[in-house]
Image (spheres, grey):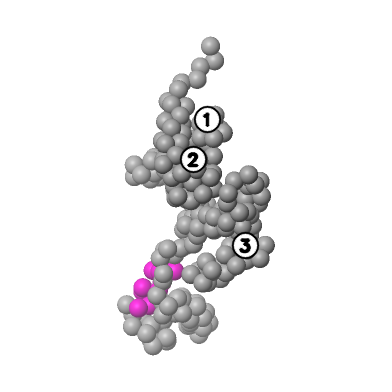
Amino acid sequence: MPLVCRIARHYSQQVRGHYDDLVQVGSVGLLHAIERYDDSRAASFKTYASHLISSEIRHYLRDHVAVVKLPRDLQELVPKIRQAEQALCQSLGREPLLEELAEYLDVPLKKLHEAQQMERNYNPMSLEQEAYQNTSSRMTLGEQLEDPEFQSFHLAQEDRILLQDALHRVKAQSRQIIEFAFYEDLTQTEIAKQLGISQMQVSRRLKKALGELWETLNTRVTPW
């Protein structure tokens, strides 16, 4: 666990406020390392575990941490807008206009609009969310989209399921090297150290493994 904490602390310097989450994710990588480590290989457990812990954390950051850094002045303005809206609602007896909010906060109208737009667009919406409320229609946002990229999203999900199934049907050696290369983000040199073989052998094994996976994916299985 000290190793997990040290690696999590390193990545938390890049994304503030995620240290505890990174420790939990890194612990998953540590468990994978415990399950998969082969002490007959040249690499030490610490080296092997470090790769898996870092890999899990990188995957988490890629999938869960926002890549867009919002301007600090707009972030600080958002809670002030909420407070101003409450104060003006009480004094005016109605929802305040943008111009009234801007005057109350002493900020340009354009900046106020940007802050409100940022707040609306910052939180992602699920495609499964209902498009209409208080109606008999149960259509989701996703069902309203005509963008072909939405269909591509579904196809990608189906492809992932097919890929996982095919991966379980290839040889154990092929599955291991594919997982090293594409799931744990190891370079061929790093894989070579893990397996105790040369980089050239890794290249040949990986090419063979991908060929086996491709053949598995393109083999039609019938019940007769």
Say which residue label 2 marks.
Answer: 178
Are there few (<14), some (14-19), or many (20+) residues within 10 Å of tag 3?
A: many
Q: Secondary structure at mark 1?
A: loop
Describe residue 210's horizontal placement relative to residue 47 as left or right: left
Q: Earlier in the sequence, mark 3 or mark 1?
A: 3
Q: Position of residue 35 (x, y in %)?
A: 66, 46
Label 1: which residue? 170
Q: Secondary structure at mark 2?
A: helix
Q: Is residue 55 on the magenta stretch?
A: no
Above or below, 186 against 174 in this view is below
Mark closest to the chain's N terminus, 2 or 1: 1
- Asked if the magenta segment contains residue 116, the reply would be yes
Answer whether labels 2 and 1 touch (C-beta < 8 Å). Answer: yes
Percent across and percent down for residue 31 are 65, 51
Graded by Cα atoms within 10 Å as few (under 14), some (14 to 19) or many (20 or more), the crowding at tag 2 reads many
Q: Which amino acid does the dot numbered 1 rest on?
A: Val
Disc 2/disc 1 C-alpha distance (Å): 10 Å
Front one among 80 and 215:
215
Q: CA distance from mark 3 to mark 2?
A: 24 Å
Q: Answer left or right for 86 relative to 120.
A: right
- Answer whether residue 9 is visible to the viewer in this image: yes
Q: Label 3: which residue?
A: 4
Q: Amino acid at mark 3?
A: Val
Q: Quadrant of residue 203?
A: top left
Residue 7 sits above or below residue 126 on the image? below
Residue 93 seen in the figure: no
Residue 82 or 79: which is nearer the viewer? 79
